[in-house]
Image (cartoon, rainbow, N blue to C red):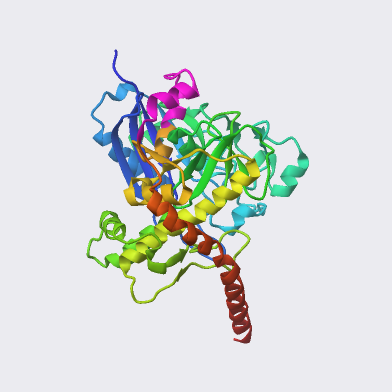
Amino acid sequence: MSGPRYVVAIDGGSQSTKVLVVDEAGTIHASAQRRLRPTESPSPGHVVHPDDDLWDSIVEACREALGRFKGDPDRIVGVGLCTIRFCRALLDADGGLVEPVLSWMDERVSRPHEQDARVHYVTTSSGYLTHRLTGELRDSVGNQQGVWPVDQERWRWSDDPDAYARTGMRAEQLFDLVLPGAMLGRVTATASAETGLPTGLAVYATANDKAVEALGSGLRDDRTALLSLGTYIAAMTVGRDASASDDRYWTNFAAEPGRYLYESDGIRRGMWTVSWWRDLLDAGQGITDDELNAGASGIAPGSDGLMAVLDWLAPGGASHRRGALLGFDGRQGRFHVHRAILEGIALTMRGHVDAMEDALGHRFESVIVSGGGSRSDLMMRILAAVFERPVRRNRLTDAAGIGAAISAFVGARVHPSWDESVAATVHAADSFAPESEWVRAYRPVREAYSLLPRHLDPLFLEWQAIAARAAEGE
């Protein structure tokens, strides 16, 4: 039987789960998306995905996507599973959740695991969801980001006993690791009945969600940076040195074995802040991102002096910081605030990319922009002007979904290599050159913006101290 071959790509993000049915040329034939429920904080510092929300969202999105698929289901050759990084799942002896999955925002994921008699296994979000899909105790080595006893150079669990002591984990509590593109297992009859995925369908490992997004964006050389406009915004480039280290970037597993990503500092609630402002304005009126972008396009660069500081969720190591809107003088309205938020994203990330370039010793020639924010022409124009170099986007904005599909196509041997799979499935859309008038306008704005932490940090630190003294007096 001839015809195109397909894979099911599962892209589990911080705000939603998307499922795509993709052919070997990178065309999406069916898709579905389920928003995740808001995270819950059952106690200070604890942030979890309620109940079994990650799995439930996969079940619903898979059933809807497969229900919309008009092709031959017998031509589906695999599943690529991509999930949120830095999460932690605590499982009992039967593989069930002892408590809801810990979000990347939970302070416990940045600390060693504290032993609990109820916890038989400690794994990532991808390890837990692999178990739900296949019944296997396997996980991708590429999603072991954060506090795990992993040997990053050899892509396996560490042989050093001190690594287990430092992370609070015992070797027998950890799942077996496989490389990106390797098979994790096959869909069980139980999982098939819930999701609609065919029983016995192979499930292939990817890596952490940012690495999979980089793969699906076509990031392949170290003279290009990828700007990922997601809930967490970061810039990345490719590298080969697992031990590369600098306080201006950190090293992360890539989605292809043997490769690494160098990742800048980021914005922890980046595009979330754009959504926050839209939802705040909405109040049942149905205002859209397109309407906000259209209104903000008529405002000059610099938003008439309005600046947005995007620490809506404070960065690690600076818990005193908060988000701020500065510079109101009566001229500004809702479109100014929207543009200031977009400009705040661009200005913040230009600073982070400059720092990474200084550390690496070379300048990036161009920038690929991925994520939902790349659909905005206004955002792309602002980025090109602030970064002072061309920025481009791809035809499909769901780069993590395409990256998950690439991993499955390589695993199923539909494409013979990672390079050929990327070439077959990732297709450029358009490029935005810096506009000289905007470039000139943003230079003084960028200089002023860089001074804000120096003035705001003392204010927020004093605010934190005042609040602590008031709490002690209660």
Q: Residue furthest bottom?
A: 473
**Of 318 and 412, the residue lying toward us:** 318
Q: How many marks on residues?
A: 0
Write down the quadrant of residue 460 in the picture.
Answer: bottom right
Taking the image as drawn, is residue 101 in sight? no
Magenta stretch mostly in which secondary structure? Answer: helix
**Of 353 and 197, the residue lying toward us:** 353
The image quadrant where one finds the N terminus is top left
Q: Residue at x 55, y 53 (%)?
A: 351
**Of 30 and 355, the residue lying toward us:** 355
Pinpoint residue 197: horizontal percent, then vertical percent: 35, 32
**Of 457 and 38, the residue lying toward us:** 457
Q: Residue at x 44, y 55 (%)?
A: 440
User: Residue 425 in magenta?
Assistant: yes
Position of 112 with respect to 61 (left or right) is right
Taking the image as drawn, is residue 300 in sight? yes
Pinpoint residue 72: horizontal percent, then vertical percent: 27, 23
The image quadrant where one finds the C terminus is bottom right
Above-or-below relation of 40 to 22: below
Pinpoint residue 342: horizontal percent, then vertical percent: 40, 57
Report the magenta residues as a range.
405-429
User: Residue 147 in magenta?
Assistant: no
Above-or-below relation of 401 to 17: above
Pinpoint residue 157: horizontal percent, then vertical percent: 67, 35
Above-or-below relation of 266 to 188: below
